[in-house]
Amino acid sequence: MPDGSQTPIKTMRSIVVNEYTNSLLDPDAPMLGPVQNGGTIIANTAPGCWGPMITPRLRGGHEVTRPVFVEGAQVGDGVAIRIRDITVTSTATASGHDASPEGFCLGDPYVAARCPTCDTVWPETHVDGIGQDAVKCDTCDNPVTPFNIVHGYTVTFDETRSVGLTLPANAAETIAADADRYAALPDGSKQHSILNYAPSDMPGTLVRMRPFMGQLGSCPSMPMPDSHNAGDFGAFLVGAPHEYAITPEQLAEHKTDGHMDIDAVRAGAILVAPVKVEGAGIYMGDMHAGQGDGEIAGHTMDVSGSVTLQVEVVKNYPLDGPVLFPLFEDLPPMARPFTQAEQAKGAKLAAKWGVTQIEPLAPISVIGTAANLNDAIENGLARAALLLDVTVAEIRNRATINGAIEIGRAPGVIQVTFLAPLAKLDAVGLGGFAREQYGL
């Protein structure tokens, strides 16, 4: 098994992943694979957020797949990830807006849960009963609740996985009695299903399903709790009172922004992730059944599912974070490629005013992350300027007249989505992905 320091000899054309981390992304831990450049990764993913959040033994707030070593991926490269398929396997899930009771953690309830009764950090726990006190400490048998649901819902999905419906208390409790089956928890998952809480504060609400990956990317270059592999959640690690504390400089250097919660990271999209350790360490998790921009409740419908990816190494990738080529329908109106009719009108304007060439343009979405949305925008603008070798002022103009700033997640994940000069994308090896995605 590759361990991040060895060069693999034999590679696989495809790999099936059924193993999960203890919510910690560790570049020194053995990776799965290696999978060949151009190969396929198929994974069964466990729910993120609420299930791991109520399972104190998990140290990162999510439960993601073990990273996969990609042949030929060197530090300073990128890996283009074509998302071939995302399929929800859960029949139901639960979620809601959260609160963190005092005394149940060392500084961060996602990373360092504790039992206030026996003072055990990362205690082993079990489920006894239904409701928000159902998770009990194995040592003292008292409830361990690093998170409570302030207002929540249990939702079940139709057989076609097109819509969901939130349920009343009696139905939510019926599902809670067989929570793992309704959640379709993978065999290797260690989390308690959030369905055990049986929330039912807004029954009878119909929702659309539009599944995507909340976590998808490459391994950071130092050990990091999985849900904190981004500039906003990662900021909670700075100066933290637990063993995963880091400095601002370490966060900026080592994170790869794999935890984005961007709803456009769905089947058909192409994501390019930075490589900060040999082999990249491609991992995934936190599948969402659907979500509006911003994930403003803090959480959404986390589900189990199956994912198929195809990976391709991009040499000399210039950014320290991801870029995305969304589906056409996920592009903001101003960032969509011009139609033939629009181009013909533009050609008439060019002829009238003596413009000899109209620059070919293509959509791209550059991800920015930081502790808050304003700083995340600045991060995204700076990354886009570096990518195209232009000024931030030019990116501001292009994102204004030919794009938009989109919110992935509050408090601090955004997309700078705009029409970029195709020649500039070609110069950094990304033009081909734009042509493929948008038929240019």
Image (cartoon, rainbow, N blue to C red):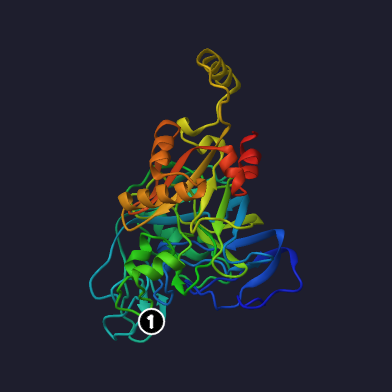
Which residue is located at x 61 percent, y 36 percent? 438
Q: Is residue 86 left or right of residue 47?
A: right
Mark 1 burial class by Cα count in 10 Å: few <14, some 14-19, many 20+: many
Percent position (x, y) of residue 174? 44, 59
Say above or below: 199 vs 19: above
Seen from the viewer's position, the closer of residues 200 and 334 is 334
Q: How many marks?
A: 1
Question: What's the residue type where badge 1 is placed?
Answer: Pro
Say above or below: 145 vs 45: below
Q: Is residue 264 visible?
A: no
Which residue is located at x 36 percent, y 74 percent? 246
Percent position (x, y) of residue 50? 40, 62
Which residue is located at x 76 percent, y 72 percent? 10
Work out which residue is located at the far left of the displayed protein and give it.
Answer: 102
Q: Work out which quarter of the rendered image holds the C terminus and state it.
A: top right
Q: Work out which quarter of the rendered image holds the N terminus and state it.
A: bottom right
Q: Is residue 237 visible?
A: yes
Say above or below: 139 vs 380: below
Judged from the image, the secondary structure of the residue bearing numbered disc 1 is: loop
Percent position (x, y) of residue 389? 49, 47
Residue identifier under label 1? 123
Q: Is residue 367 left or right of residue 7?
A: left
Seen from the viewer's position, the closer of residues 300 and 362 is 362
**Quadrant of the rendered structure where residue 104 is?**
bottom left
Percent position (x, y) of residue 359? 56, 30
Which residue is located at x 38 percent, y 81 percent? 123
Q: Is residue 394 left or right of residue 1?
A: left
Seen from the viewer's position, the closer of residues 152 and 172 is 152
Q: Is residue 55 left or right of residue 10?
A: left
